[in-house]
Image (cartoon, coloured by chain):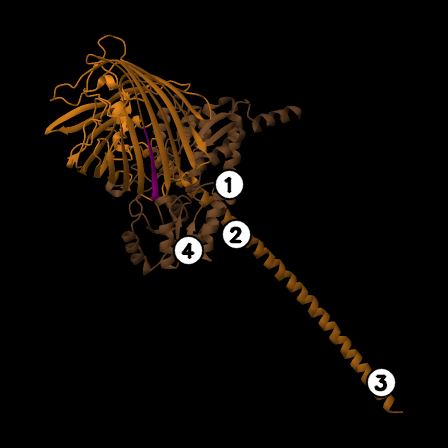
Chain colours: A orange, B brown
Amino acid sequence: MRVIPVVASLLLCSAIVSTANAQDIADELAELRALLGVMQQDYEARISDLEERLARAEQLARGAKQDADEAFEIAEQTAIGQSSGASAANTFNPALGATLSGRYASIDQGWEEIPGFLPAGEIGTGDAGFSLGEVEVNLKANVDNRFFGNLTFAIHDEGGEVEVELEESWLQTTGLSNGLTLTGGRFFSANGYLNGFHRHADDFADRPLPYQAFLGGQYIVDGLQARWIAPTPLLFELGAEMNWGSGFPASANAEDAPGAYSIFAKLGGSVGVSNNWQVGVSWLSADAVERGAGHHQDEPDPGTFTGDSDLAVVDFVWKWAPNGNSGQRSFKLQGEYFSRSESGVFDTIDYDGDQAGWYIQGVWQFRPGWRVGLRHDVVDADSGPLLAGTELEDPGRQSSRDSLMLDWAPSEFGRLRLQFTDDRVLSKADQQWYLQYIMSLGAHGAHQF
Amino acid sequence: MRIYALFSLLIVCPLTAQAIDVFACEPEWGALLEELAGDAATVTVATTAFQDPHRLQAIPSLIAAVRQADLVVCTGADLEIGWLPLLLRRAGNAQIQTGNPGHFMASDFVRKLEIPKVIDRSQGDIHPQGNPHVHLDPRNIRRIANALAERLIEFDAPNAAFYATRLTEFQTRWSSAIDSWEERAVALAGLRLASHHRSFSYLANWLDLDIVANLESKPGVPPSGAQLAALLEKLNANPPVGVIRTPYENEKPSLWLSERLEIPALRLPYTTGSNPAVMDLFGLFDETLKLLEEQVQ
């Protein structure tokens, strides 16, 4: 029985102790909670303080970047404003360019005349061996806000004597609108496709035979030209020219009236981006008065022609380049057909004849800077039996040639060309080789289509 | 409310039904005109991303287009020297001649890089006014956009509010795009690259890329085998991470070098329109950065 009170008192004690302990713990917990609360508040305050400072710093940084950007922009704008060059007396010099050319030719039997034709101008195979070609000097610039001016001298050596020729001297309107352009002075006629190009831009070392026979190499007009472009997506152009000069096939007319008139039309466009084409027709009517062959100055004139000379030319050109990017590979095919009708008096003989000629050529650029080309050119004189025994005697056969060329342009400004020609202009065939250089200095040339 | 709606209609749509005819020499200016003028301009773009703007010819279809243009928008700085002067002369159109409001040369409104100290053709087909490929720095696009919008307003005054709104809207989008590109560009700083032509100088200047070599030792002159071999030897010790070129440049020299240095040859878009990802100016820079970022990872 004594055991029971002992156990009971023990239990009681432990209960009292445990009650006391629980009280302490609760107090401590409350204390801790309070402490934590303070700490939390403290940290929150600090964090929000930090956040505020961070935001301020970010704002400052943004502002600094904005300031820096603005300062940069101001500096750039100042630099842009100041980047115009200084003024000098030569600031308005026209664009000046020169083209140098020369060649080495291997020719057994050259020619100065095409049998059955008597053109003026620079035609023929030229001399064998090394010879300088034409040196061309060109000046061009806007005259004012209405006119553009262009001047070209051709300088060549004629048997030891240096000759300067005024090849082009023309003014052109820039201030007209509605597709209208007027040109006046001495200029390359728009008749035919190749006629509008300088010879140094040709793809072969010499002009095709019909150009030599019918136009003396190039038809140059002293007069006026008007051309109009229609407001259409395709290029459709009409034009007319009046010539008072003596550029073959015209001859300087004693009267005030122009010696030659011509009209022309061109149509051109694109097929996709890779193909571009142009076709043209032209008709030239020249009134020749005692027209001679101008290139035999030291020899007696072989005869003069007085009468009407009408020339019709049909031309086409097609150029292809993958994606229209001619830097790597490209192909060009061009051809022209000439038909001439002359009637009048040669020396004292009445004559009426029709002549025709054509050429076709293709040029393939197979890698950057390298091209290969093939050309066939033909002229056919049909002067009739009346002129037998004269310089215009009908040879009874066609004159033709086949030429193969390879050229390399190390840059846009220089070109070296090797050409082989199987020449059947005279009755005896001739094999000719040409090695030619064409280099341009100064102003950048135009990429004429 | 109705009046307000009418007014806002005025700002978002051009007043006149007659769109102005614009001739743009390069695709990037066509894209900028699309942003600034939308349907208010009918734009003819002379070249595609696959055509070298140095080498174009004055082809018949372009003569016909310039003849009808009210405004010509080109790069200038002699980039189009071979063909644009001829187009202008042939077109019989007074409005777009040099010095008239219809003649807008984008590079006039930015500072050009690489202005040559020696102006001589022995240095290649150099541009005396400096590198003309100005559009690959988006900050230049921002400047040109301001000038172009001003020109459009000068041209088409009745639609001034329309152009001003489009400009503001474009510049807002463009500025935030520049910010995001510049953030991405931090990782590209100092990236070493070889480039075919100096087509990417403005991009490199903006992104702080390091163009260690140009494959064309003289601009515009195709590199010869000997020049490439010398370049290979020079780069062998410390090869760049890639060779970059435009869509119109000859891929052969790039591929030759890339194969030997065992580095990728990258065809960067250069301008708009070369693939579906780069149909506008935003896409052009997004895609260019993406292609460069792939070289860093």
Judged from the image, the secondary structure of the residue bearing numbered disc 2 is helix
Q: Which residue is tagged 4?
A: B264
- Residue labelled with disc 1: B279
**N-terminal label among 3 and 2:** 3
**Of tags 3 and 4, which is closer to the observer?**
4
* Magenta span dominant secondary structure: strand
Instruction: Tell me if A274 is positioned left or right of A8 in this view.
Output: left
Q: Residue at x 83, y 87 (%)?
A: A7
Mark 1 in CB contact with mark 3 (< 8 angstroms) = no
Q: CA distance from mark 4 to mark 1?
A: 24 Å
**Badge 1 element:** loop
Q: Secondary structure at mark 4?
A: loop
Q: Are marks 2 and 1 on the same chain?
A: no
Query: Which disc is residue A54 wearing?
Result: 2
Q: Is residue B119 above or below residue A196?
A: below
Q: Return the x and y of residue B82 as percentages of the image width and height.
A: 33, 33
Circles 4 and 1 in contact, beta carbons < 8 Å: no
Hey, what amino acid is under mark 3?
Ala
Q: Spatial distance from mark 3 to mark 4, Cα to Cα?
A: 93 Å
Specify the segment rendered in magenta: A358-366
Q: Nearer the viewer, mark 2 or mark 1?
A: 1
Three-letter code, disc 4: Pro
- Chain where mark 1 sits: B
